[in-house]
Amino acid sequence: MVRAFTYPYQPVAAHLIPTRRCNLACTYCNEFDDVSQPVPTSEVLRRVDLLAALGTGIVTMSGGEPLLHPDLDGIISRIRHHGMIATLITNGYLLTADRIARLNRAGLDHLQISIDNVIPDEVSKKSLKVLDQTLRRLAEYAEFDVTINVVVGSAVRDPADALTIAGRAAALGFPTTVGIVHDARGQLVLLTDEQRRILNAVVGMGASLFDFANYNRFQRNLSEARPNTWQCRGRVKIPVCVRRRARALVLAATGLSRHSAGPLQG
Ligand code: SF4
């Protein structure tokens, strides 16, 4: 990790998608389907080895729902074997006590759950009411760090939900990040004054240690239409989609690389 920050030619973080399939269907999400097969384990491990050879510091797995990959524990172990930090973004639905214990054994460093609302609605079922028991299980059994990501934006019916969820996370000892959720076309809608106030209140509650990309500051700048400044550390030109700002290198299931913008969903 220190190596990745010290040497400009090494990636700080890479984003690995072991499956595009998801067990939920949030209506604002354009990063999943319900038909894709998991990327074959041998191929995922080959990519992990390549990331290690590049000197990558952090490998984050998301999807789709990454817990649907049958060999996720082995993939995490391989990341840790190379001395890279392994992090996971999940919707939390599959986190039984046994699954948490397996993630402990695999050596997972950090996990993020994104919770969109307090009560499930037609947009999202990633809800505090459904996931509260999972949060309590994580507080009891997880040996890895846990961050709860809350969201504000047009897809959230009651913006005050973000404060309720962040408060519950704090009560269980979990730090919170906050994201601006996009619509189904991947576009952001300007925040209202109330949404901005809530976003700032959650930011003020403090960020996770794993907020290495300064995610909360990124979101606050976004909400105030202020630019985020970026610096190419590698001085290597990589094709970047101009509509989206680079945050992490993504190795997509197709094997092509692309750049991803926050908020990352799980
Ligand atoms: S936001 Fe996450 S949980 Fe919801 S459909 Fe997309 S990948 Fe699945």
Image (cartoon, rainbow, N blue to C red):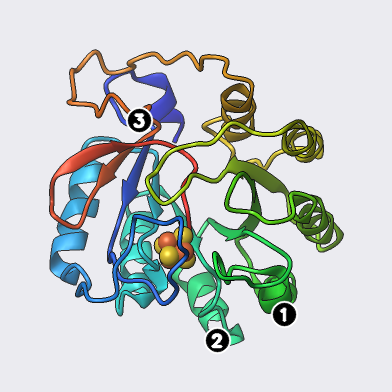
Identify which residue is drawn at 36% across, 64% down: 64
Mark on residue 200? none
Indicate the quadrant where residue 6 lies. Answer: top left
Where in the figure is residue 175, as x and y percent of width and height? 73, 49
Please tell me whether mark 1 sits on a helix, a strand or a loop: helix
Q: Closest to the observer: 254 or 186?
A: 186
Please tell me whether mark 2 sits on a helix, a strand or a loop: helix
**Tag 2: Cα neighbours inside 10 Å, few (<14), some, or many (≥20)?**
few
Where in the figure is residue 101, as x and y percent of width and height? 56, 79
Task: Work out how far the residue at label 1 is from the one at label 2, CA to CA, in angstroms.
Answer: 14 Å
Identify which residue is drawn at 54% across, 71% down: 104
Q: Are marks 3 and 1 in contact (CB under 8 Å)?
A: no
Q: Which residue carries the number 1 mark?
A: 133
Q: Quadrant of ligand 1?
A: bottom left
The N terminus sits in image quarter: top left
Mark on residue 98? 2
Q: What residue type is disc 3 on? A: Arg
Indicate the quadrant where residue 29 lies. Answer: bottom left
Q: What residue type is disc 1 on? A: Gln
Q: Earlier in the sequence, mark 3 or mark 1?
A: 1
Identify which residue is drawn at 47% across, 47% down: 183
Please tell me whether mark 3 sits on a helix, a strand or a loop: loop
Label 3 lies in ligand 1 vicinity (Cβ under 8 Å): no
Q: Earlier in the sequence, mark 3 or mark 2?
A: 2
Task: Work out how far the residue at label 3 is from the one at label 2, CA to CA, in angstroms.
Answer: 38 Å
Mark on residue 244? 3
Task: Work out how far the residue at label 3 is from the one at label 1, CA to CA, in angstroms.
Answer: 35 Å
Where in the figure is residue 127, as x and y percent of width and height? 66, 69
Residue 139's place in the image compared with 214, above or below, is below
Q: What residue type is disc 2 on? A: Asp
**Tag 1: Cα neighbours inside 10 Å, few (<14), some, or many (≥20)?**
few
Q: Earlier in the sequence, mark 1 or mark 2?
A: 2
